Image: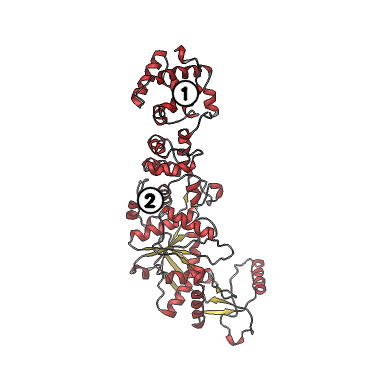
């Protein structure tokens, strides 16, 4: 490597764009991972390229099938499936080891026989002397013939020792690291298995990845991976340097790194527990660190057209669950009523009439910010008699209120046209006759019909429940003799 090397990514510029999302299957699809996948998907779509998936499952002790399924499920829900079947890193271990051996044979790597005890002693000395610990192995330039017989060894890359390496990062701008800070890291373990650093480089090359877009916690890894790439480029003459874009991590509303205490959940929890729609989470993640003027509501098509990695901010973005819910409320109001009925029904304690639930959506969704609120608002539709009253509704139904319900029952029982306008006209006339505001009639009527003090408009409730059910619920809460006294 020259005294000063710059990774500008220019070699990637002439190739068709290929991005990748490469999660480790040790848990759910984190919200930060979902945003990384989104940015990779958008960058590829914007440039007419390919977006690929790779499961980095080399940590066999922590990788699980359940986590793999959860990752695929979350990506599928967000519409971020890969353009080709996913690559599984562990299955490619033989290929990784083959590359390590090629580097070894060409003199770009070496067998290191330092024992764990020797390394621990050197690390302790560095700590005692308050200096950075760097691997400085005597085996780097040793005669292989002097190696101990049958002793275990690891394979280390011969990292550059002089000059600087500069990465022209698509998000961070130029980033420089002194080559003296990069020690001879391991690329092949003593059991012959490849390390993460080697596997990533080989997989990105073999998958044709031109742009590596990932969290900025991987920025330091890029300099180590570049050491491998350049050694291979020198060896084989065909390992172009990808362009890098390291995206700042997501923080909580308080500015601290996002964690569970901020509501940092898996993508599946935003869907299953919080009742968020995929298009809302897509839009929210898009705006989390990237923007297009003052636009807040951005469709998938607009996102593909407008997305530019250069407009991703350098500072960490802040995740705000309240803002996500507000955005979700917009998408609920825009959503198809039949689709919302299908999504809401499983969240209801009592199975609703699906057609009735769909008919109710226009009046239910204007009040809701998530599917759970939709389910709560729709609960009255499938409630059975005797209707359970919440505490506020129970308190509202005083003796006077029950007298009033008896009069309302008598009025509505004589009503032949059970649609909003005549129902409203009749109740308004009654309120005027009694010298009351319409709300004085609507409040006990709402409690009797829904068991709650909040609901869609009372005339919508009456129409949705229908004549027979409405009258039965009113009668259940009314004083039996009140109607005859009207």
State the residue in front, 71 or 292.
71
Q: Which residue is mark 1?
A: 474
In screen coordinates, is 120 left or right of 41? right
Labels 1 & 2 near each other (Cβ < 8 A):
no
The location of residue 110, given as percent across then percent down, is 55, 80
Position of the N terminus by quadrant: bottom left
* Image quadrant assignment for residue 83: bottom left
The location of residue 310, given as percent across then percent down, is 38, 58
Q: CA distance from mark 1 to mark 2?
A: 52 Å
Q: Residue at x 48, y 40 (%)?
A: 372
Closer to the chain start, of discs 1 and 2, is: 2
Q: Is residue 137 above or below residue 52?
A: below
Position of the C terminus by quadrant: top left
Mark 1, secondary structure of its residue: helix
State the residue in front, 443 or 252.
443
Q: Residue at x 43, y 66 (%)?
A: 167
Tag 2: Cα neighbours inside 10 Å, few (<14), some, or many (≥20)? some
Q: Is residue 163 something that shows in the picture?
A: no
Q: Which residue is mark 2?
A: 291
Tag 1: Cα neighbours inside 10 Å, few (<14), some, or many (≥20)? many
Residue furthest top in the image: 485
Q: Nearer the viewer, mark 1 or mark 2?
A: 1
The location of residue 315, given as percent across then percent down, is 46, 53
State the residue in front, 408 or 284.
408
In screen coordinates, is 384 left or right of 121? left
Residue furthest bottom in the image: 145
Mark 2, secondary structure of its residue: loop
The location of residue 427, given as percent across then percent down, is 39, 20
Q: In the rendering, which numbered label is found on residue 278?
A: none
Q: Is residue 474 above or below residue 24?
A: above
Q: Is residue 4 something that shows in the picture?
A: yes
């Amino acid at each position: 490597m020259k005294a000063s090397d710059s990774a500008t990514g220019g070699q990637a510029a002439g190739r068709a764009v290929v991005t990748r999302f490469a999660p480790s299957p040790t848990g759910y699809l984190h919200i930060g991972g979902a945003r990384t996948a989104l940015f990779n998907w958008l960058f590829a779509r914007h440039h007419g390229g390919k977006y690929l998936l790779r499961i980095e499952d080399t940590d066999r002790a922590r990788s699980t099938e359940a986590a793999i399924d959860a990752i695929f499920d979350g990506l599928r829900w967000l519409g971020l499936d890969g353009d080709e079947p996913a690559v599984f890193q562990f299955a490619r271990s033989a290929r990784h080891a083959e590359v390590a051996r090629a580097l070894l044979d060409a003199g770009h790597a070496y067998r290191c026989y330092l024992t764990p005890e020797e390394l621990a002693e050197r690390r302790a000395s560095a700590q005692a002397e308050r200096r950075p610990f760097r691997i400085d192995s005597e085996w780097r330039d040793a005669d292989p013939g002097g190696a101990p017989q049958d002793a275990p060894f690891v394979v280390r890359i011969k990292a550059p020792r002089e000059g600087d390496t500069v990465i022209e990062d698509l998000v961070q701008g130029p980033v420089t690291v002194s080559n003296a800070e990069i020690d001879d890291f391991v690329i092949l373990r003593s059991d012959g298995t490849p390390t993460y650093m080697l596997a990533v480089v080989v997989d990105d090359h073999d998958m044709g990845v031109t742009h590596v877009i990932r969290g900025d916690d991987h920025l330091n890894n890029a300099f180590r991976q570049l050491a491998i790439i350049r050694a291979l480029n020198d060896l084989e003459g065909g390992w172009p340097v990808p362009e890098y874009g390291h995206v700042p991590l997501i923080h909580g509303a308080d500015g601290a790194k996002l964690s569970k205490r901020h509501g940092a959940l898996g993508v599946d929890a935003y869907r299953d527990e919080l009742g968020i729609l995929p298009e809302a989470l897509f839009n929210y993640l898009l705006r989390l660190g990237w923007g297009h003027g003052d636009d807040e509501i951005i469709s998938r098509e607009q996102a593909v057209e407008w997305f530019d990695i250069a407009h991703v901010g350098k500072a960490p973005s802040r995740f705000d669950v309240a803002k996500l819910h507000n955005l979700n409320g917009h998408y609920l109001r825009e959503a198809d009523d039949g689709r919302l009925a299908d999504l809401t029904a499983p969240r209801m304690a009592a199975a609703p009439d699906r057609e009735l639930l769909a008919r109710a959506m226009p009046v239910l969704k204007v009040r809701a910010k998530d599917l759970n609120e939709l389910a709560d608002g729709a609960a009255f539709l499938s409630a059975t008699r005797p209707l359970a009253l919440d505490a506020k509704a129970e308190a509202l139904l005083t003796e006077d209120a029950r007298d009033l319900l008896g009069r309302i029952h008598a009025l509505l029982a004589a009503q032949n046209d059970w649609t909003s306008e005549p129902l409203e006209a009749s109740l308004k006339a009654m309120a005027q006759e009694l010298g009351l505001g319409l709300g004085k009639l609507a409040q006990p009527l709402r409690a009797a019909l829904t068991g709650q003090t909040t609901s869609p408009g009372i005339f919508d409730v009456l129409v949705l429940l229908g004549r027979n059910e409405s009258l039965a619920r009113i009668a259940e809460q009314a004083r039996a003799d009140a109607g005859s006294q009207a």
